[in-house]
Image (cartoon, rainbow, N blue to C red):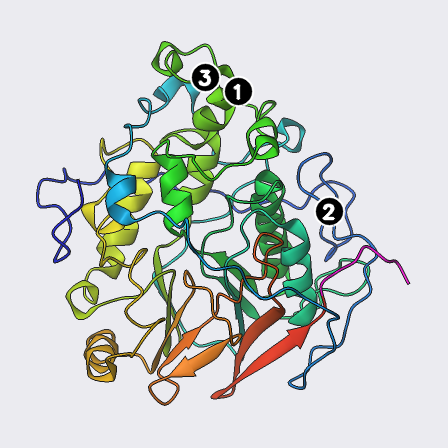
C-alpha cells in the first residue's frame, strides 16, 4: 500500500548492518583512466566525437519535442501491482566484489547521504535505457574524451534516477554507470547514480515499461536461478530480469549501494522532489532502501511508494511551484537548492524559485527525443551545458 507520506513505516524491523564492500580493482590490462569495454552488455565508450562542453547552445539538428508523459504510472498503481517474487535466498548472493569473469561490474562502496562540496558537480536526469543518451551526457559534461577515457578529474557526477525502462539498453546503462564511477574514483572524482521510481518498480516486479530487448538482455546474468520455485508464476520471457532485480538479486544489490536522496555540498539531489515532511529522513530512507534491496527487509519503505514521496512528487517540477514550501524543505536540510528529475521539461533544464530548484529531466532518451543537456555547479555558479546526441561517428 501507499504510505502515509509523513514518515517511514513504523513497523520496519531493525536494520542489519550492511557488510563492507571492498574497493573495486581496475579490470586487468585496462589503461588507468579508460572506461573498459565489457562485451556484450556494458557498452563501450568507444571513439566518439566530443562536442566541447559550453554554456552556449550547440546545434543539435531537428530533434522531436519531448513526448508527453502520458502513460507514466502513478504511485498508487505501482503500490497495487502484483507483489514481486520472494527475495533471492542468501545462498545465491554473490560476493561483494565480483570477479571480472562473471560479466557483472565490480561494485563500489555504499554511497554516503551527504558529501562535502567538490570543486565541480555535473548532474543529468532520466536516461530510460538509452546508452547513447548516457554517452552523450558524459561528453556534454566534459567527463570523457573521444576515446572514452575519464578526463573529468575530481568532478562529482550525479544522475538523478530512472536509468532503466522504456529503452532497450537497461543492462548496458547500469553497467556503464558502474565502470565510469570506478575510473572517476581513481582520479579523485565519482559518479553517483540515484534510484528513481523505475528502479524501485523493477525491484518490486512491476515491469510494464520494459521492452522486449530489456527482458532478453538479462538472460545470462550470473548469480540468478530462473528455476527458483518463487519465480514459477513469472513468464519465461520475464523470469531472468525479475530474478536479477528482485531483492537480493545481482542487480538489486547493485541498486542497493545507491541513494534515494543525496546531498553534495549545498545541493540536494533526488528523483522526484522532497516535501518538508520527508526532509529529515534522508539517511534513514537510504539505509532502509539498501536493506530492502539486499533482501534484509520484507517490504519496501513506505516513503518509496507514497504519491507525495521523494520518488514520485512533482510539486517542484510542474505547474505553479510553492516556493515557500520549497524553502521549508531546504531550510530543514541545510541546503541552498534542490535538483530533481522525473518530470519532462519541454523548455530544457530550467530553474524555479530564484534558482532554488533545478529541473533536469529533458527527455534525453530516444523514447522522448529531447535534447542533450547537463547541469554544472562549480564555484558557486550554476549553468546548463548543452551538447549533441552521439551518432556513432568516429571522426
Element type where label 3 sits in the image: loop
- The residue singled out by tag 3 in the image is 235
Query: How many residues crowd mark 2 within 10 Å: few (<14), some (14–19), many (20+)?
Result: many
Is there a contact, CB below 8 Å, between mark 3 and mark 1?
A: yes
Prevalent SS, magenta region:
loop
Element type where label 1 sits in the image: helix
The mark found on residue 237 in the picture is 1
Horizontal arrangement in the rendering, residue 224 relative to residue 11 (left or right): right
Figure check: 139 above or below 250: below
Horizontal arrangement in the rendering, residue 71 relative to residue 178 (left or right): left
Residue at image location 37% in from the left, 58% down from the top = 112
The part of the image, by quadrant, that contains residue 249 is top left
Is there a contact, CB below 8 Å, between mark 2 and mark 1?
A: no
Residue 306 vs residue 178, the one in the foreground: 306
- Precedes in sequence: disc 2 or disc 3: 2
Horizontal arrangement in the rendering, residue 302 relative to residue 44 (left or right): left
The mark found on residue 247 in the picture is none
> x%, y% of residue 52?
75, 77
- The residue singled out by tag 2 in the image is 36
Can residue 125 be found in the magenta stretch? no
Residue 226 vs residue 12, the one in the foreground: 226
Residue 284 vs residue 238, the one in the foreground: 238
Amino acid at each position: 500500500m501507499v504510505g502515509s507520506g509523513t514518515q517511514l513505516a513504523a513497523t520496519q524491523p531493525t536494520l542489519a548492518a550492511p557488510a563492507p564492500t571492498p574497493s573495486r580493482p581496475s579490470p586487468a590490462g585496462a589503461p588507468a583512466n579508460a572506461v573498459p569495454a565489457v562485451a556484450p552488455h556494458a557498452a563501450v565508450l568507444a571513439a566518439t566525437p566530443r562536442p566541447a562542453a559550453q554554456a552556449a547552445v550547440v546545434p543539435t539538428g531537428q530533434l522531436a519535442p519531448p513526448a508527453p508523459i502520458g502513460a507514466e504510472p502513478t504511485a498508487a498503481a505501482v503500490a497495487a501491482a502484483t507483489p514481486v517474487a520472494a527475495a533471492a535466498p542468501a545462498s545465491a548472493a554473490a560476493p561483494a566484489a565480483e570477479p571480472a569473469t562473471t560479466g557483472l561490474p565490480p561494485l563500489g562502496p555504499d554511497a554516503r547521504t551527504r558529501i562535502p562540496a567538490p570543486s565541480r558537480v555535473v548532474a543529468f536526469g532520466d536516461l530510460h535505457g538509452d546508452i547513447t543518451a548516457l554517452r552523450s551526457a558524459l561528453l556534454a559534461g566534459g567527463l570523457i574524451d573521444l576515446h572514452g577515457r575519464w578526463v573529468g578529474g575530481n568532478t562529482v557526477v550525479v544522475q538523478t534516477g530512472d536509468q532503466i525502462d522504456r529503452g532497450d539498453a537497461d543492462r548496458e546503462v547500469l553497467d556503464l554507470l558502474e565502470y565510469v564511477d570506478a575510473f572517476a574514483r581513481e582520479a579523485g572524482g565519482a559518479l553517483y547514480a540515484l534510484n528513481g521510481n523505475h528502479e524501485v518498480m523493477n525491484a518490486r516486479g512491476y515491469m510494464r515499461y520494459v521492452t522486449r530487448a530489456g527482458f532478453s538482455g538479462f538472460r545470462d546474468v550470473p548469480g540468478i536461478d530462473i528455476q527458483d520455485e518463487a519465480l514459477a508464476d513469472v513468464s519465461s520471457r520475464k523470469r531472468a530480469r525479475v530474478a536479477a532485480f528482485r531483492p537480493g538479486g545481482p542487480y538489486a544489490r547493485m541498486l542497493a549501494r545507491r541513494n534515494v536522496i543525496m546531498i553534495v555540498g549545498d545541493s540536494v539531489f533526488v528523483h522526484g522532489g522532497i516535501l518538508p515532511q520527508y526532509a529529515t529522513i534522508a539517511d534513514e530512507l537510504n539505509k532502509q532502501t539498501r536493506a530492502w534491496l539486499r533482501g534484509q527487509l520484507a517490504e519496501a519503505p513506505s516513503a518509496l511508494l507514497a504519491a507525495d514521496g521523494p520518488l514520485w512528487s512533482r510539486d517542484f517540477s510542474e505547474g505553479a511551484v510553492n516556493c515557500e514550501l520549497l524553502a521549508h524543505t531546504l531550510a530543514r536540510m541545510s541546503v541552498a537548492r534542490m535538483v530533481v528529475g522525473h518530470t519532462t521539461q519541454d523548455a530544457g533544464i530550467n530553474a524555479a524559485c530564484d534558482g532554488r530548484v533545478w529541473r533536469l529531466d529533458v527527455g534525453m532518451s530516444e523514447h522522448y527525443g529531447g535534447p542533450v543537456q547537463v547541469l554544472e555547479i562549480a564555484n558557486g555558479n550554476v549553468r546548463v551545458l548543452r551538447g549533441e546526441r552521439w551518432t556513432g561517428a568516429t571522426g
